[in-house]
């Protein structure tokens, strides 16, 4: 027997949409009407022994209080209830729709007219025409979806004592502990990157105490049934969306493995009575193989994963999981000092952070972001989307997809300095896919070679402009993502990796060589049509030619491409063409208020929203290095002016970006002041997820990146030979000298501390200690044998370490052989 999702009648359909709309923006999981606990909560549980933990004295009452576990592909939000434990599940390839081609074949014919209107200053007309002729079909992309929930109902209404739930970031295990009826109950939940299953373990300190009923719930077209007396199976197909039919099959299965007690199954539930302990293994998969192949077999995948994991003991599963997590997580340690505040539950600490003294919460926030990246972006899986891996809704805000005009790039900002370079692999794989789908978009829409991606993409790697021309007609998404990949090369020096991404870099550059146009006033080369992400220059009109950010991204793309082609000894002619074109790009301009101009024209101070959340033109200051505190002080002053005009507070991610920018301007106290808002209830939910609002994970990653920028910067380089030489020797060795800036923006709020294991460009690992606001010791490990300069305040020292070499420096940067 099975419980089948019935076909919609129109009335049910309307009701369903009503429910979806209610859920929109406030992902709430899918399970309705579960039993609620009506007993009392007594006592006060102590904090967990591991201080790198999030912890609470009550179960999660909403989705943004639940705690995330994940192995890069399969995730769960753990609620920790008493009458019901709910695990809202995710699988990273369960998105709506199927392979589709959104490219608009009318675009190419309209392109010259749109350009003409823009160059005549008829921006509104240009935007209107682009809206009619140049947008993707459908106009929106596919949403990321949840398969549904696993729930465990427990028969209890006795009072509960010393309740605590926590998430240990060091072991990546979520736990729930409480005493009820004189019995101490413990739940442990983790998502194993080794065995690819989510593991739930229920134990008690007395035998025969574990009794519950397990079931599942789904908003999908799916059935839920039991199999073999001990396994729940949810199987179905993904949703249709915006005219694209669901083409994926998916399956989630949960096997119940009790020690003693009695297990029974009915049609869609499994009950366990009086067991000593129980382990549940949960697997989930879809038929997605890649963006054009949906022929996978989720039943075979999940059956095999459960079968393999079932042969291992809980302790074996746990030990393998912890070892693999710690291999990545333990590479970086950050100590900003501890105060009494660590005795408080995490939600209370967030509430008090801005007005209190709790430096460890900032360290916890930093490590939580590293935890989230490890759990949402592992090799072989999908990149971290707008919500990482975690989404309880069928209609999440902005579809929980990849917004590539800032948000996806921000997700990966802490990856390299945070010593998690491996986590970039899913992003690399996605960019290589986009270079394929984007080649079609380039050809069909622009008549251009190479490839292009606009401001969003999804599981199906759609690259056409979406939502509306004022947001979507921005051809720079792919080029910006390539900058993240280039950073991976800067930190690792991995030539094989460079060879792998070079064709995508070259293809992106080719697209711009084919589509850049000369603007009529100065005859500079510019993108057109484009926009400065989502910021209108006049009422509701953002379409324009050559916004500053585009030219900044292109200066990076072209320089990187030239350098890569030199390193790889390829494409000399192409390189020369890029160098000539790069010189003709519109330059950075300082406007009438002393600000860095956001557009070709000095529209900034009259634009409708001078406090706009995006600070796109400041890309040159961060994440790029084109505007620099030391080497381009006038531009840095202009960027500072722009930042001041914009203001410190915006959405979660936009607030996080500002922290990085102020750190690049060496203003640690201003950066810290902004971190105070970010880490307050306005922008941080009780479970420490960032609030845009609603939940968006980019703010977590951007905030963590801001903390690293306050402590260590390595974007600056001295060129021993100029990069942009068209005649450069093929295969020349890297000719840059990296400058590592130690504690460039240390705020007064963190006078004493230490950090271990941060990475710097050029292949260095850096440890530092400081006291009374001053560096006391630094250790550099060289991973690639590159020379470098180390700078602390006014002092610099040049170092020539061999690969594997280490140097210890004191607070005056004197070498200190016996630290
Ligand atoms: C961009 C931002 C929004 C939001 C969305 C996902 O469009 O402007 O604030 O973050 O991405």
Image: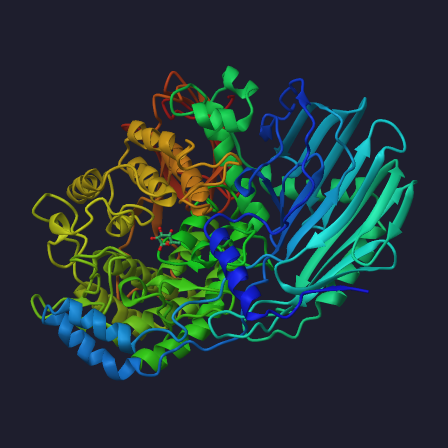
Please count the marks in the image: 0
Expressed as whole percent of the image width and height from the top left, the position of residue 259 reads 89, 41
Tell me where residue 233 sits by quadrant.
Answer: bottom right
612 relative position to 686: left or right? left
Residue occupying the far front of the picture: 11
104 relative position to 43: left or right? left
- Report the colour scheme: rainbow
Expressed as whole percent of the image width and height from the top left, the position of residue 106 reads 31, 83
Expressed as whole percent of the image width and height from the top left, the position of residue 576 reads 27, 70
* Residue at x 61%, y 26% (from the top left corner): 57
**Residue placed most toward the observer, 626 or 423:** 423
* Residue at x 34%, y 21% (from the top left corner): 748
Tell me where residue 298 sits by quadrant.
Answer: bottom right
214 relative position to 488: left or right? right
Asked if residue 360 is positioned above or below residue 417 in the image, the reply reads above
Expressed as whole percent of the image width and height from the top left, the position of residue 566 reads 36, 64
**Residue placed most toward the observer, 400 or 586:** 400
**Residue 768 appears in the picture as rendered:** no
The quadrant of the rendering that contains the N terminus is: bottom right
* Residue at x 16%, y 61% (from the top left corner): 586
**Residue 487 appears in the picture as rendered:** yes
Asked if residue 220 is positioned above or below residue 39 in the image, the reply reads below
Tell me where residue 665 sits by quadrant.
Answer: top left
């Amino acid at each position: 027997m099975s419980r089948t999702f019935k076909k919609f009648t129109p009335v049910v359909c309307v009701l369903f949409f009503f429910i979806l709309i209610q859920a929109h923006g406030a992902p709430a999981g899918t399970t309705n009407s579960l039993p609620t606990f009506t007993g009392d909560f007594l006592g006060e549980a102590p904090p967990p022994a591991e201080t790198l933990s999030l912890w609470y004295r009550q179960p999660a009452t909403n989705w943004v209080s639940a705690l995330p576990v994940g192995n890069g592909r399969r995730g769960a939000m753990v609620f920790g209830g008493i009458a019901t434990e709910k695990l809202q599940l995710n699988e990273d390839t369960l998105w709506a729709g199927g392979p589709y081609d959104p490219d608009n074949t009318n675009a190419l014919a309209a392109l010259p007219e749109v350009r003409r209107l823009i160059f005549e200053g008829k921006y509104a007309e240009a935007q209107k025409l682009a809206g009619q002729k140049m947008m993707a079909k459908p106009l929106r992309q596919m949403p990321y979806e949840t398969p549904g929930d696993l729930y465990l109902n427990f028969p209890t209404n006795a009072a509960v004592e010393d309740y605590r739930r926590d998430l240990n970031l060091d072991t990546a295990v979520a736990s729930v502990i409480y005493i009820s009826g004189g019995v101490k109950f413990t739940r442990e939940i983790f998502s194993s990157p080794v065995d690819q299953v989510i593991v739930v373990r229920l134990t008690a300190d007395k035998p025969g105490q574990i009794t519950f009923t397990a079931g599942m719930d789904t908003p999908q077209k799916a059935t839920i049934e039991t199999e073999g007396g001990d396994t729940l199976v949810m199987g179905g197909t993904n949703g249709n969306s915006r005219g694209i039919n669901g083409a994926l099959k998916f399956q989630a299965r949960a096997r119940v493995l009790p020690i003693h007690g009695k297990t029974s199954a009915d049609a869609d539930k499994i009950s366990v009575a009086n067991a000593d302990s129980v382990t549940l293994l949960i697997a989930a998969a879809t038929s997605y193989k890649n963006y054009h192949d949906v022929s996978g077999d989720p039943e075979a995948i999940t059956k095999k994963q459960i079968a393999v994991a079932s042969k291992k003991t809980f302790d074996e599963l746990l030990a393998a999981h912890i070892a693999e997590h710690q291999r990545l997580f333990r590479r970086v340690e950050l100590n900003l000092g501890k105060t009494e505040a660590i005795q408080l539950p995490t939600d209370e600490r967030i509430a008090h952070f801005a007005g209190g003294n709790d430096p460890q919460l900032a360290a916890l926030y930093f490590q939580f972001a590293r935890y989230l990246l490890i759990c949402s972006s592992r090799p072989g899986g999908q990149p971290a989307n707008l919500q990482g891996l975690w989404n309880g809704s069928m209609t999440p805000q902005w579809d929980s997809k990849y917004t590539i005009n800032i948000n996806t790039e921000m997700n990966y900002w802490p990856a390299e300095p945070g010593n998690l370079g491996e986590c970039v692999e899913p992003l690399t794989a996605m960019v290589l896919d986009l270079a394929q789908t984007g080649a079609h978009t380039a050809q069909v829409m622009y008549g251009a070679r190479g490839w292009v991606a606009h401001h969003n993409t999804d599981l199906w790697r759609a690259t056409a402009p979406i939502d509306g021309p004022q947001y979507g007609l921005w051809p720079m998404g792919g080029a910006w993502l390539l900058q993240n990949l280039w950073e991976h090369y800067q930190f690792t020096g991995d030539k094989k990796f460079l060879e792998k991404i070079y064709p995508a870099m070259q293809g992106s550059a080719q697209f711009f060589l084919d589509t850049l146009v000369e603007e009529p006033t100065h005859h500079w080369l510019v993108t057109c049509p484009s926009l400065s992400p989502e910021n209108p220059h006049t009422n509701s009109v953002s379409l324009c030619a050559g916004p500053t950010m585009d030219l900044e991204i292109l200066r990076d793309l072209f320089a990187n491409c030239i350098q890569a082609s030199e390193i790889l000894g390829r494409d000399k002619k192409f390189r020369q063409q890029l160098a000539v074109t790069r010189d003709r790009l519109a330059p950075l301009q300082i406007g009438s208020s002393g600000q860095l101009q956001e557009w070709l024209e000095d529209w900034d101070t009259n634009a409708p929203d001078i406090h706009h959340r995006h600070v796109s033109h400041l890309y040159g200051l961060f994440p790029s290095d084109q505007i620099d505190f030391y080497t381009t002080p006038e531009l840095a002053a202009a960027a500072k002016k722009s930042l001041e005009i914009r203001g410190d507070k915006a959405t979660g991610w936009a607030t996080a970006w500002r922290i990085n920018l102020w750190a690049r301007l060496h203003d640690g106290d201003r950066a810290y002041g902004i971190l105070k808002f970010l880490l307050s209830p306005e922008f941080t939910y009780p479970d420490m997820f960032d609030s845009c609002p609603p939940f968006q994970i980019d703010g977590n990653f951007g905030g963590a990146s801001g903390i690293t920028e306050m402590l260590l910067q390595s974007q600056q380089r001295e060129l021993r030979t100029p990069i942009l030489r068209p005649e450069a020797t093929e295969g020349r060795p890297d000719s840059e000298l990296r400058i590592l800036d130690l504690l460039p923006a240390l705020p007064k709020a963190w006078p004493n501390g230490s950090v271990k294991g941060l990475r710097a460009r050029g292949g260095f690992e850096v440890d530092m200690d400081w006291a009374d606001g001053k560096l006391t010791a630094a250790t550099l490990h060289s991973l690639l044998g590159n020379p470098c300069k180390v700078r602390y305040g006014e002092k610099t020292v040049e170092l020539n370490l061999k690969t594997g070499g280490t140097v210890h420096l004191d607070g005056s940067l004197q070498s200190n052989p016996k630290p």
